[in-house]
Image (cartoon, grey):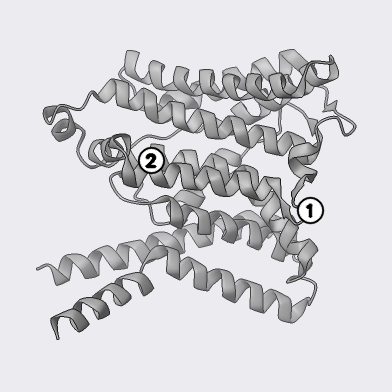
Amino acid sequence: MEVQKNYKSKILKIITSQPFILFLFIIIVAVVTNSVNDKFLTASTINSILGQAAGLGLVSAGATVLVISGHFDISTGRMVGLAMCAMALMLNAGMNPVLVSICGILICVVCSVFNGLASILFNAPSFVVTLATQNIYYSIALLLTNGYMQTLYGKYRTLASYEIFGVFPLIYLVLILGFVFVYVILKHTRTGRQVYAIGTNQRAAYISGININLSKLKFFLISGVLVGVASMLMLSRISAAQATTGYGMETEAIGAVVIGGSSINGGKGGVIGTFFGVILLSMISTAINMLHINAFYEYMVYGIVILLALAITAVRNYTVAKKNG
């Protein structure tokens, strides 16, 4: 009887979890959209959705680490633009694509770690610091390109076009590995325990012996690596870059994290929910286009979905608190 009770409790926990609810939302959006436009559930459309989700997904995976730890980086979109412009210029100058890819990741790592370092040195919230640094990164990208778009003419298409065994796109594998990387860090490493501990109560984490400043730099480093890889994927997929590329991605990434069930107050959340949040946002964008709905409604729908996710989380927290007395 006790075993059966525990089994039912686990099942109830799964079906009331944010990832499962998002999975249901994804199915509903897919079925409804496909009933109006039967081209929605085709291979080409699914490929487009996942391709669109690749860059945003990796940025969101990094944002998950920061949000759970109680930090925000709203400069990631500008980082993407800067890295893509720098990589495009290097590729057009004839540099080796592998070396260019490494440089692109390093640019994002340096920018992200600088954000964390500035937050520590000035004892300021990361949100405020990155509000300033996003303008710096945008300005550098403009100076590098003189405001002009950099087109690659197919010079960097391998990541976006290569298929493993001629079937599975490499870009999907990179996306999945990025989320697995963050999942392993959060669930099975000391760094992951520090993420949750600092996000829950920074003072208690400090008293327990956690080096808060070093940990913060590690969190921003992880985010920077993932933003760098996202920049590579996006440049390969778009085959062009300009300073405005990536603008607004930071808000979509944080939105995906919140939709996925991570608490904006820190200490709670996970990358699985973020993954489904990214897929849902990408599906909504494609669905609006395929249903011939005015594109101006897209961000309104994003906002409604985020508010709905917050409402679901609030109801769940209230139910748990009431159950625990």
Count numbered badges in the picture: 2
Q: Is residue 15 left or right of residue 152?
A: left
Marks 1/2: CA distance? 31 Å
Q: Is residue 180 above or below residue 28?
A: above
Q: Which one is earlier in the sequence, the residue at label 1 or at label 2?
A: 1
Q: Is residue 143 above or below residue 208?
A: above
Q: Is residue 119 above or below residue 34?
A: above
Q: Is residue 324 left or right of residue 146?
A: left
Badge 1 element: loop
Residue reaching furthest right?
153
The residue labelled by disc 1 is 166
Residue shown at 69% from the left, 57% from the top: 49
Relative to the observer, which residue lies in front, 180 or 55?
A: 180
Badge 2 element: helix
Q: Is residue 251 visible?
A: no
The residue labelled by disc 2 is 185
Query: Image quadrant of residue 89?
Result: top right
Give the residue type that dot 2 points to: Ile
Q: Is residue 54 left or right of residue 152?
A: left
Residue reaching furthest front?
165
Residue shown at 58% from the left, 76% from the top: 28
Give the residue type that dot 1 points to: Gly
Residue reaching furthest bottom?
1
Residue shown at 74% from the left, 14% from the top: 144
* Residue 113 percent across, percent down from the top left: 45, 20
* Residue 199 percent across, percent down from the top left: 27, 39
* Residue 242 percent across, percent down from the top left: 76, 28
